[in-house]
Image (tube, rainbow, N blue to C red):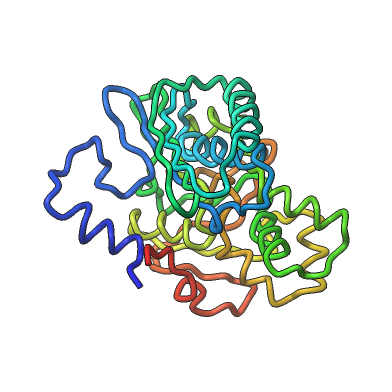
Amino acid sequence: MLKETDFIKNYIKKGTKQTKHSLNFEDDIAIVDNYAYSTDTISEDIHFFSDDDPKTIAKKLIRANISDLISKGVKPKFCLLNFSSGKLINQRWLDSFFKSFHQDMKSYNLNLIGGDTIATKNKTVLSLTIFGPVNSKKIIKRSTAKFSDFIYVSGTIGDAFIGMSIKKKQIKFDKKAKEKLISKYLVPEPQTNLTNLIRNKANAATDISDGLLNDLNNICTTSKLGAEIKFSSIPKSKEVIKFLSMYKRYEKQILIGGDDYQILFTGPKGLEKYKNVTKIGRMTRKKGIKITDKNFNNLLEGFTHSLY
């Protein structure tokens, strides 16, 4: 099983001339001519399912991509769409998808300027490349955390992963809470209101797409630091709290489950005073991630963002 990090190291970095534009392939963005670029892909049966409403799939595609640039303090402006149409696609599906797609584009002041379309014989795969102007000389990277930094997250954590688990495994749960959790998985809510805070106050940042712990590990590894966090400090919605009271074994999973699309960032003391921001720990000199109030061992070993 090839990990994404190994793929980048062995196939992307190898033989590629390193420039300031690529940020050494250690981040989710590249900087060219004062524009920040990012791209993300969602695939049928992994990020969405054939019985999902096309309207929500369109929103997830846009919002998952927006999240990358917001976490760098950049406001998205333009995008390119690559549309690989699978067996589930028909005229009705397209009408519904693109009505929602264009509505969401308008909501986020995005401009579609091109892309590509193909037909496949199997699954549908959708990709968006998104970019916007960099309004500051300082780029908020994963690798720029400081030893003195505190660790912050936006929103709540775990809703999307639990929503996906409920949807896939049909776990019995309160109907109203269940619908809210599944909705968080289907339609992310990127924290556009925090763009200026990240640009002006954060030292390092990333969005949480691969799970809180894995994305924090990316900051730690590239910044050559460690971290201490409190499980009890991690912000959880009332639905997640209720769910965990019934299914305690999922506590570990909300740390490594993906699709939150919240912002994880480090910075000076006091940033929790901003709306929708919670302090969960601090950066340390000792490498690795320690969860101070839980005996969770080797969680990262259980997570693999793999390509096959």
Residue 212 makes an appearance in the image: yes
Q: Quadrant of the N terminus?
A: bottom left
| Above or below, comparing residue 169 to residue 191 in the picture | below
- Image point (34%, 25%), residue name: 35
- Image point (38%, 68%), residue name: 287
How far across and down, in percent of the image, does residue 65 sit? 49, 38
Residue 29 lies left or right of residue 299; in this view the side is: left
How far across and down, in percent of the image, does residue 266 sit? 49, 47
| Above or below, comparing residue 167 to residue 105 in the picture | below
- Nearer to us in this view, 199 or 71: 71
Residue 266 makes an appearance in the image: no
Q: Quadrant of the C terminus?
A: bottom left
| Above or below, comparing residue 65 to residue 107 in the picture | below
- Nearer to us in this view, 219 or 226: 219
- Image point (57%, 25%), residue name: 105
Would you identify the image quadrant in which residue 250 lies? bottom right
What count of labels does the image hold?
A: 0
- Image point (41%, 54%), residue name: 219
